[in-house]
Amino acid sequence: MSAHHSHDHEHDHGPQPTSLTLYSPAGVLLKAAVLRRAAKRLAAHGFEVHIDEAALLKHQRFSGDDEARLEALHRVARSGTSIAMAARGGYGLTRLLDRIDYRLLHQSTERGMRWVGHSDCTVLQLAMLAHHKSVSYAGPMGAFDFGGDAVDEVTEACFLEAMRGELEAVGFRTEAGFDGLDVKGSLWGGNLWMVTSLLGTPHMPKVKGGILFLEDVNEHPYRIERNLLHLHQAGVLDAQKAIVLGRFTEYKKSPNDRGYALKSAVEHIRSVTRTPVLTGLPFGHVPTKVTLPVGAKAQLVVQGRDVLIAW
Amino acid sequence: MSAHHSHDHEHDHGPQPTSLTLYSPAGVLLKAAVLRRAAKRLAAHGFEVHIDEAALLKHQRFSGDDEARLEALHRVARSGTSIAMAARGGYGLTRLLDRIDYRLLHQSTERGMRWVGHSDCTVLQLAMLAHHKSVSYAGPMGAFDFGGDAVDEVTEACFLEAMRGELEAVGFRTEAGFDGLDVKGSLWGGNLWMVTSLLGTPHMPKVKGGILFLEDVNEHPYRIERNLLHLHQAGVLDAQKAIVLGRFTEYKKSPNDRGYALKSAVEHIRSVTRTPVLTGLPFGHVPTKVTLPVGAKAQLVVQGRDVLIAW
């Protein structure tokens, strides 16, 4: 524990471990061992780890049917745990969006609970932001980030600092051409398709002047471009102060591409929006990912090719 | 030619062949021979076939750069051709949506021009409907439907009748449970992802009380469900009188599915919307497809398991 937590030592019982609950809001976890390994690794960092009772349920491709996953979400919100970490993403939260008690989730964040995850969790995090301006965390998930053969050091360090409230900024390198950019706004975003899937619904936050970060996986660049154009045509891109692209990975090229690549998609988006579109954020379906507060006020500053997002 | 065109015989020069232009608004056509074969086949039906000068352009994965494809679209609209048939879909019209002269396209339809296509053409057809209530045709495309080894008889017959203005209804079999359904409304729809990609943009028609038809290709059932839920959460499904599902094809199952299938997606959608969701429409990325007027007033009647959509 760092100096930030030294006041804990004044309690009679010594420092209280931070409680962390692993729960499954979306896709089925086929291997319980992966989650147990994640729990063990997180416990080794001093967390008091609890695995939600429904975390290993199986219903078709879901971690339990809709009722079970909705109950789990609300149970975790009421539990008083410090950190609610999704075990994995997949698909499933979209089914729950119209039924979630966002006030309950907001109350949990007001008490200091930190909801963490990415991918499918994007729709939960943005709906929480849309309904009650709740802040949550785009960051690692149990199975993917802590349940494998190794844990990425940057991901781990960044997550631990963010959960302690010590992380105040992340830095990365971008392309040339943005030197001197200095903007302030709400930091928001996540998985591109999941962000796009909220357009025109009551679960989409209406963020003006924000810093929007995006990543995706298994999507061909033309589909990435099409989703970015959807955001543009809905007025979202021009309304931001900066767009920050994370990693777009695991897609297959097509014989039809003929030189069209992810770079072409980015170039096209830059040609239609007046908002700066930066690349290079270490975030996405990759081992190395930063943890970012979704809905927090942030500042993005570029010096040369170095970007700092601070909050 | 049928009796519907017998008045042509009164002209001095005998019956005028209907002109048909093949143009490429989206993806690159790698093989010119395919388009030439389509042209030959269509000419054999009595059409005076013209291949637009830009139809075989190649720019990355597009049939020409954005300027060339936009010009082609406007050139075809001005040409006075009777039928504007897209050579193929792919991806590309989304890039043009903010720049198309919809008034020009509307004027062409007012003069009787019929715009035909599916897949990527969905965004064009729906944007035409959104901006000027223009009617266009969801139907076959040059390369896919007329350029292959064989032409589907139903597709061909249906297309020819629709172009002659003789087609007034299509019939198909659906599941049990809809006997007696009888609704009237605007017929609209197309490719599911393309319909969804317009949500929240000025190119999305605001159709209330309509009959919405949908198909898709290469999308796993969970992604089909997610897009249908997007339409639902945006209020579109409940606002219709009927949803009619066409073919959803060429997706790969996943080891995570565990019994989740297309049927599960349809069942879930039926559980959330009050609008009847029928299956069985012969339309999609399949050889056998009907031709449907997008934006026309239509009536859908079910007797037993037989569905008739008439306009």
Image (cartoon, coloured by chain):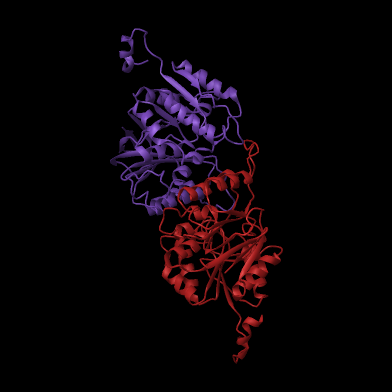
Chain colours: A red, B purple
Q: Nearer the viewer, residue B230 or A7?
A: A7
Q: Nearer the viewer, residue A114 or A166?
A: A166
Q: Quadrant of the N terminus of chain A?
A: bottom right
Residue at coordinates 32% horizontally, 18% vertically from top-left? B4
Q: Nearer the viewer, residue A155 or B173?
A: A155
For residue B147, say whether it is visible.
yes
Residue lying farthest to the top in this orientation: B12
Q: Nearer the viewer, residue A94 or A298?
A: A298
Across and down, in percent, residue A262 comes to 62, 46
* Number of numbered markers: 0
Across and down, in percent, residue A7 comes to 61, 87
For residue A220, say whether it is visible.
no
Q: Give the side of residue A94 with respect to residue A291, left or right.
A: left
Across and down, in percent, residue B245 comes to 42, 41
Across and down, in percent, residue B185 comes to 30, 40
Residue at coordinates 31% horizontally, 9% vertically from top-left? B10
- Quarter occupied by residue A104: bottom left
Q: Quadrant of the C terminus of chain A?
A: bottom right
Query: Relative to residue A292, is residue B97 depicted above or below?
Result: above
Residue lying farthest to the front in this orientation: A180
